[in-house]
Each structure stands twice: as structure tokens, then as C-alpha cells.
Image (cartoon, grey):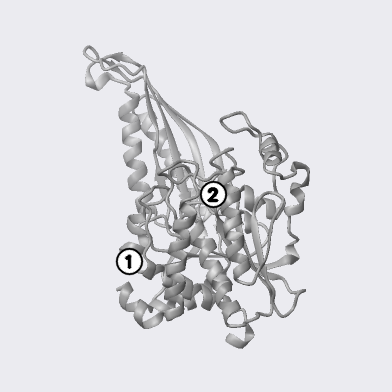
Amino acid sequence: MAEAFTLAAVSASAARAAERVMARCDALAAISETPGQLTRVYLSPEHLQANRLVGEWMAAAGMRVWQDSVGNICGRYEGCDPSAPALLLGSHLDSVRNAGRYDGPLGVLTALEVVSHLHQNAIRLPMAVEIVGFCDEEGTRFGITLLGSRGLTGTWPADWLERKDAQGISVAEAMLRVGLEPLHIGASQRAVSDFCAYLECHIEQGPCLQSADMPLGVVTAINGARRLNCRFTGHAGHAGTVPMGQRQDALTAAAEWTLAIESMTTASGHHLVATVGTLECLPGAVNVIPGQVKLSLDVRGPRDEALCALLKVLLAKGHEIAARRGLTFDAEQFYGISATECDQGLQHRLNQSVLQLQGRAMSLPSGAGHDAIAIAECWPVGMLFVRCKDGISHHPDESVTASDVAFAVQAYINTVLSFDEGHL
């Protein structure tokens, strides 16, 4: 069990570090625009307050601290060679509405404990270590995701400054209100030569580690996704007068397809998942056979080839069901993102650290998006997952244990030390 592993494999200093991480997660959770809930969105007073607090913790860990031009809070702990590409650690500090307290901040605060360990033990790696607390990964306020990490990569779309929140305030206006200059957003971009790799620690946001009774796992890839609006079209008819064998019922076709999606995706393996999340029956009357059903399809997986192959057979099944039942079927994709593979070398480093602590390592994909998606466009990325209770995330019941966080801190420290030739 995790407690036994903790006593045997995790240092006392890592256990104390975990307690600090938990307390700091609580302190950040108190910085919220909604009393009794956690909501912290981009360019809000709470965003800047959280940055200031994290910046104080960074400075106490021996880091040079600054807030960049898009609102990320950044810290740098120098290495032996100032010209060497730095190792970047981090995660995000913003939240969804009525959030949990570990999604995002846990990754920033465990990274801080890594640098604190280096600082307290007077360790300098060959390269600098930088930490970034990304300002907006969730996209809660403006509907723009990965905004902070795309500041580092310099991949802000031109129209982002014009995007407005629910109150009609644009990103540009919101930046000016907090003292950021919209015309200078490019200053946050870092050169490809600035970093050698990016590591992110994050709660799993799923139940796999809990099911396997393991505190930690190593991420293989961040799932790609395809989202489609789909439609079965038949004929509406009187619920009492049209015999069962003569109906062109769009809902029964949609129901058959939904069950086929479940069984075919389960059989496909490859960590693929598919979800029908919305369903609308027309005309929507209790005494009318549905003549049309609109439904959504969300398909995700860690490998684009397998994802595309599954989507192809699912859509073919929809057409087959419709033809057999005398209906028509059509589907239109409205969103797509490619899978992001984690770097093999970084996976190996993380696996070695996890194996050392818990005797076995679990490799698994991430079904949720992360800042690593944007960062991977410029630098190799690796991710460490921490078990969370019942896989609950984006909810106040989000929970991790101090014991598991101690595992994460120790694994993170060991992985970062592996970049030091003297610790290989």
C-alpha cells in the first residue's frame, strides 16, 4: 500500500515538502472570486494575487522571479552554465468555476519543492531550472485554452486580443486593466534554444492509478480528440397509428448506434474512448415518433492513426444502421486536435524514478488537455501523474493524499537530478 511505500522509499524531507504543498494548495484555494468556492480566472484580481504569492515562494527558493507579458509567473534557479538550455517545470494556476484545489497548482508547487531541494542542498545542475505558473490553461473566462503556454511558444492567434468575456470585456481591455500591455504580448515568447525539456506533474483526473493501487504513473501521450455533430433523419409519425414494423424512428437508430459506439470502442483497445454527450429528439412530443435526432460524438485517443481508424468505422456503422432502418445519417466535425506524444527519453527518466519508489511503473495516456500540448510544439515534454480519489477533477471533491504527494515530490526530485551528470 502507499503508506508502506512512503515509509520505505520517500525521504523525510520529501514528506515535509508534501505537507507544504498541501498547505500551499489550501492557501491558493482561498484566493477565489466566489466565497465558499474556488474560481480563479485569467486577468482577474485573484489571478494577480495568486501570482504574487507564488512569486514569493519562488523567491524564497532562491529563484529570480518575474511576471511575463501575458501574465505567467516565472522563476529561474541558475545552473553551472548560464548559456545551457534550461529545464522547464510547471503547470497552471487558473481554474474552472467551482473547481478543485489540485488541478494545476499541484504541479507548480511540487516543482517549487524540487527547486527548494536544490537550493537547500546547494546543488547546481549543469543547466538552470525554470518554473512557470501558467496564467490560463482552462479558458474559463474568454473561452481560449492554453493561453499562458502559447505565450511562451509565441503562438497566440491574431484574434485572441479581441475575444470577449461574458461581460463584453476583451482580452486587450482586461490586460490594460491589470497593467499588461497588449502590444507587448510577443515579449513572453521564448526561443527554442532557451529550454532542453519540459516536465509537468499533474493529478491524473481519472481512476486508473487508484484501480491499480499506485500513487504515480507516467504519461505516454495526451489524447487527440475529434468532436462531431451527428444526425439521424427518418420520418415523424403518430405514436398510436404507425405499426412498429413500418416506422422510420430516428431515436431507435440513434440508440442502436450509441450502443454500437460503446461496444466497438471497448473492443478497439488502444486506450480509445468515445462519448455521446448530447441528444435532441425532434419534434420532441410524447405522442410522436421522433423524425430526427441530433447527437454529439466525442472520440479521443493517444495515437492519431488509431483514433482516425476508430472514427471511420463508427461513422460507417452509423450509415449502415440508417440504411437498414430506412433513414439517413450525416456527421460534421467541428473540433479536432492531434495527440501529443510525450518524449521517450523523458518517459524513461520518469519511469526509472517511479520504479525506484513504488517497485513498478504504470504508463497511461492523459484523457484531458494540458499546457504540455502547446509546449510540445517547441520542446520535448514529459508528464508525471498523481493518483486522485475516485478520478474526480474539476469539482470541489477533487482530492489527493499527502502520502501520494510525497511520492510525487521524491520522484520529481530524482528525475530532475538525473539531468546532473554527478547524480547519474
Of residues 75 and 268, the one drawn nearer to the viewer in this rendering: 75
Point out the image quarter for the N terminus: bottom left
Residue 63 seen by the camera: yes
Q: Is residue 403 above or below residue 338?
A: below
Q: Which residue is mark 2?
A: 94
Query: Foreground residue, 107 or 15?
Result: 15
Image location of residue 309, percent across then percent down = 49, 49
The answer to whether the residues at label 2 and label 1 have Cβ atoms under 8 Å apart is no
SS for callout 1? helix
Residue 136 seen anywhere in this rendered image of the structure? no
Tell me which amino acid carries mark 1. Ala
Rendered image quadrant of residue 156: top right
Residue 332 % position (x, y): 52, 33
What residue is drawn where x is 46% and y is 45%?
A: 299
Relative to 403, is 171 on the left or the right?
right
Amino acid type at circle 2 is Asp
The residue that appears at 76% across and 49% down in the rendered structure is 186
Which disc, if any, is residue 212? 1
Where residue 120 sits in the image (x, y, percent)? 57, 79
Disc marking residue 187: none
Which of the 4 image quarters holds residue 56? bottom right
Task: Name which of mark 2 and mark 1 comes first in the sequence.
Answer: 2
Q: Position of residue 192 (x, y in %)?
A: 73, 62
Q: Secondary structure at mark 2?
A: loop
Image quadrant where residue 288 sits = top left
